[in-house]
Image: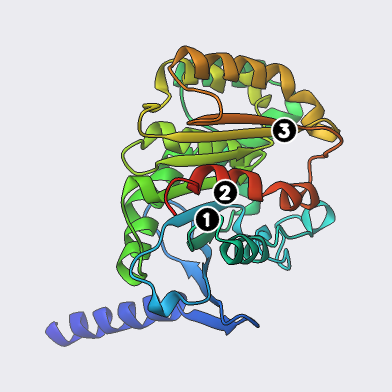
């Protein structure tokens, strides 16, 4: 019996090691990409994680960390989750290299968290306020309800994975400054929505969020009700919003105006700890998010050079 138990444990260790194998590649500037296939979780489905380390990482003491959603799109877009629409990368690594070389921001680590395509809406839609979520779900159009009828809203479990599993792993295995003031979030569209939800739910973990082309219209903007009483302390947090004027982004301005009024009401000061930018002619696409990515990063990190 004892041998059977030991054999079972050995198989478990081998299988876990195999599933979390890391793939490394080196770019022309000696930056490093660590790719974790099927990163395991007790809370959500396993998924791929990509960690980008800047040139000079080996000589660094500790670096800020940026967690980005839809991680398969943030570098070169080779593994876009929906190739018909999203086969374009943000080239975040190239933008950051440029900002580093100019001395605009400190070097940082980027953790790309892949989405599970079929469960993206379920994981990225805020689960609170629960009563309002339930009401809006019942009134939503049929095509929208079908997305959720198959999958419960699991954003709370997803954020638990981020905070209790992924972040501790990153802090243990990399040279991070693990404090709140050096831990950031970023995402676009639904990724912007979950970024806003995460910083509100875990204000002691995340100090800043970049909410790019935030998809406020989900269930008729129900999440704005949550923000009224749950925004983090403006003395210790920074939040960036933006939107374009074409495609899906053309729907966002009325919602963003409401959010901006909440920011003011909750003590945020524009251009200090919060900013909202409107980009005329920008559409809802990685090509535009890539072009303006430097704006949120410089805003969030400008005081920790």
Tell me the residue that label 2 is attached to: 297
Image height of 35 relative to 66, above or below = below
Q: Give the quadrant of residue 279.
A: top right
| Numbered disc total | 3
Q: Is residue 152 visible?
A: no
- Please provide percent x and percent y for residue 103: 55, 60
**How far apart are the alpha carbons under marks 3 and 1?**
23 Å
Where disc 2 sits, the SS reads helix
Q: Which part of the image, by quadrant, shows the C terminus?
A: bottom left
Tell me the residue that label 3 is attached to: 243
Where disc 1 sits, the SS reads loop
Q: Residue at x 19, y 80 (%)?
A: 5
State if disc 1 and disc 2 touch (CB < 8 Å).
yes
Q: Residues within 10 Å of mark 2 (few under 14, many from 20)?
A: many
Between disc 2 and disc 1, whose residue precedes?
A: 1
- Please provide percent x and percent y for residue 177: 33, 58
Which is closer to the viewer, label 2 or label 1? 1
Image height of 97 relative to 144, above or below = below
Q: Residue at x 67, y 37 (%)?
A: 147
- Please provide percent x and percent y for residue 52: 53, 69
Q: Nearer the viewer, residue 132 or 196?
A: 196
Tell me the residue that label 1 is attached to: 105
**How far apart are the alpha carbons under marks 2 and 1?**
8 Å
Q: Residue placed farthest to the left in the image? A: 2
């Amino acid at each position: 019996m004892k041998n059977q138990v030991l054999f079972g444990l050995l198989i478990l260790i081998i299988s876990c090691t195999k599933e979390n194998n890391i793939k490394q590649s080196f770019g022309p500037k000696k930056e490093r990409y660590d790719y974790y296939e099927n990163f395991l979780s007790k809370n959500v489905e396993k998924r791929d994680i990509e960690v980008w380390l800047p040139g000079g990482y080996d000589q660094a003491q500790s670096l800020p960390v940026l967690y980005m959603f839809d991680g398969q799109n943030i570098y070169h877009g080779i593994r876009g989750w929906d190739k018909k629409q999203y086969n374009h990368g943000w080239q975040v690594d190239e933008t950051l290299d440029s900002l580093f070389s100019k001395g605009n921001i400190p070097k940082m680590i980027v953790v790309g968290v892949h989405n599970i395509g079929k469960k993206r809406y379920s994981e990225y839609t805020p689960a609170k306020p629960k009563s309002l979520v339930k009401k809006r779900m019942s009134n939503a159009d049929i095509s929208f309800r079908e997305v959720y009828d198959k999958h419960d809203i699991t954003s709370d479990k997803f954020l638990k994975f981020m905070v209790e599993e992924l972040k501790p792993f990153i802090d243990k295995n990399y040279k991070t400054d693990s404090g709140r003031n050096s831990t950031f979030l970023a995402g676009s569209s639904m990724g912007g929505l979950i970024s806003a939800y995460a910083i509100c739910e875990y204000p002691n973990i995340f100090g800043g969020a970049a909410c790019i082309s935030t998809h406020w219209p989900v269930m008729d903007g129900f999440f704005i009700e949550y923000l009224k009483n749950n925004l983090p302390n403006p003395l210790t947090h920074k939040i960036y919003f933006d939107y374009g004027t074409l495609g899906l982004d053309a729907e966002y301005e009325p919602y963003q105006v409401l959010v901006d009024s909440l920011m003011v009401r909750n003590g945020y000061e524009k251009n200090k700890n919060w900013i909202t930018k409107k980009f005329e002619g920008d559409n809802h696409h990685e090509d535009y998010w890539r072009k303006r990515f430097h704006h949120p990063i410089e805003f969030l990190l400008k005081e920790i050079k």
